[in-house]
Image (cartoon, helix red, strand yellow):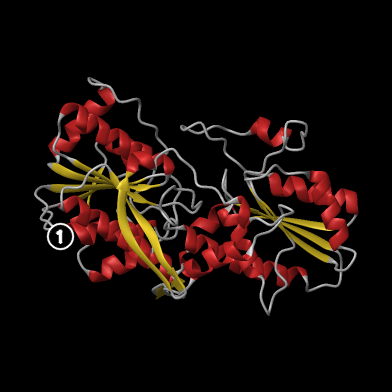
Amino acid sequence: MGTMKGNVLVGQSGGPTAVINSSLAGVYAGAKAAGAAKVYGMRHGIQGFQVGQVVDLDAILKGDKEIELLKRTPASFLGACRYKLPAVQKGSEVYEQIFKYFDEYGIKYVFYIGGNDSMDTICKLYDYGQLIGTDILFMGVPKTIDNDLEITDHTPGFGSAAKYVATMTKEIILDSHANDTKVITVLEIMGRNAGWLTGAAALAKGEDNCGVDLIYFPELPFDMAKCLASVKKIMETKKQVTIAVSEGLWEDEDSHFFDEISKNAKIDAFGHKELSGVGECIAKYLGKQIGCKVRAVNFSSIQRCGSHIASKTDVDEAFQVGKDAAKAASNGVSGHMTILKRTNDEPYTCVTEIYDVHKIANAEKKVPRAWINENGDGVTEEFLNYVRPLIQGEILPFMVNGLPAHLTLPKE
């Protein structure tokens, strides 16, 4: 590890995860081990930083106790944002303001923890720095429950979200089987264009659970008529049917089942539609056509913040990608992101490497078609073998008065 000369700045962006703060802890630990004088945090990402919202992390993370508590705290400790930086051009007021604050705080190393859109941010900061000839170094740290970042084998945050989804799916299935009546349960799971997390519902199947019956991915067009036929066939031999669907389901151009949902969707700063409602839409239609009780369960934001059931593998890897990003920067690396590289499946082993962030930003890794079954409504054994190691192990929360304790920032 090299030596850091100057101060460090770290930010978090995009949707939170159960382990994003473990990466923050890793960046902090790595920076201090490399001799960083001060470590600052952006409050609410690059958007908050533009107006001078900065946190002195040295005043908060005083020892191992705070670090361990931070690793067990869900959501974005520093606060996040969904802000798209403008195109890089010399003289831009936005970039001039940001780099002015870099100078004001003596920043020589910048780390940004996030997914696709966050890597776009670190790319643009690096590119502007190259344009003006700065000596500031910029590093990306991966995070997303969607598991859709290219190059890296998987992303921190996905394993814990997959563990939560599989656990809740098991419990919901048991609940639906409590009464001897016909019931269709539709689980709506996060995933805009990639169905990694939806597919994780398949992990619920085991000796003690029959598992989900159908899984529908955003990688393939959704066919409501085909879904209805499949449910009717399943109900010839069993009364309870459980379906997992991605929030990002779409149809071919001849179908208009989801038109109303799409029409009313809001658009975020990166041009993404805010998704929700396909599960309830499908459930209502199936209930009407089949004439039975239906339930729509939207896991919503809770699937990304369930730190009480976080995967220890995920927590440890999240910490490591942050720490190794700091190590790379201390050795003079810039414009890169830490990635995870699987070196063995059984026993599972994984190492970190660094990779040019420009080849990762704004690209999406989807579930391979070969890992979705032939009918397009389930997963193959290859998918299960890929995901299962990522949910292993537990890291118990620190309990106070019967509830998990978390680390929080002082009020602004």
Task: Measuring from the top left, give residue 122's x and y in whole percent.
Answer: 31, 39
Q: Is residue 128 above or below residue 77?
A: above
Q: Is residue 42 visible?
A: no
Position above or below: 355 against 171: above
User: Image height check: is 24 above or below 49?
Assistant: below
Q: Which residue is mark 1?
A: 1
Q: Position of residue 403 (x, y in %)?
A: 46, 71
As shown in the figure, which amino acid type bears the numbered disc 1?
Met
- Image quadrant occupied by the N terminus: bottom left
Q: Is residue 95 visible?
A: yes
Of residues 155 and 365, which is closer to you in this image? 365
Residue 411 picture location, percent across and down:
32, 50
Determine which quarter of the picture holds residue 275: top right
Residue occupying the far top of the picture: 91
> Residue at the spot x=31%, y=56% of the render?
353
Q: Secondary structure at mark 1?
A: loop
Which residue is rendered at x = 26% and y = 22% of the image?
A: 93
- Direction from residue 13 to residue 323 in the image, left or right: left
Q: Kindly indicate the quadrant of the structure image that contains residue 53.
A: top left
Give percent across and percent down for residue 180.
86, 72
In this rendering, position of residue 302 left or right of residue 72: right
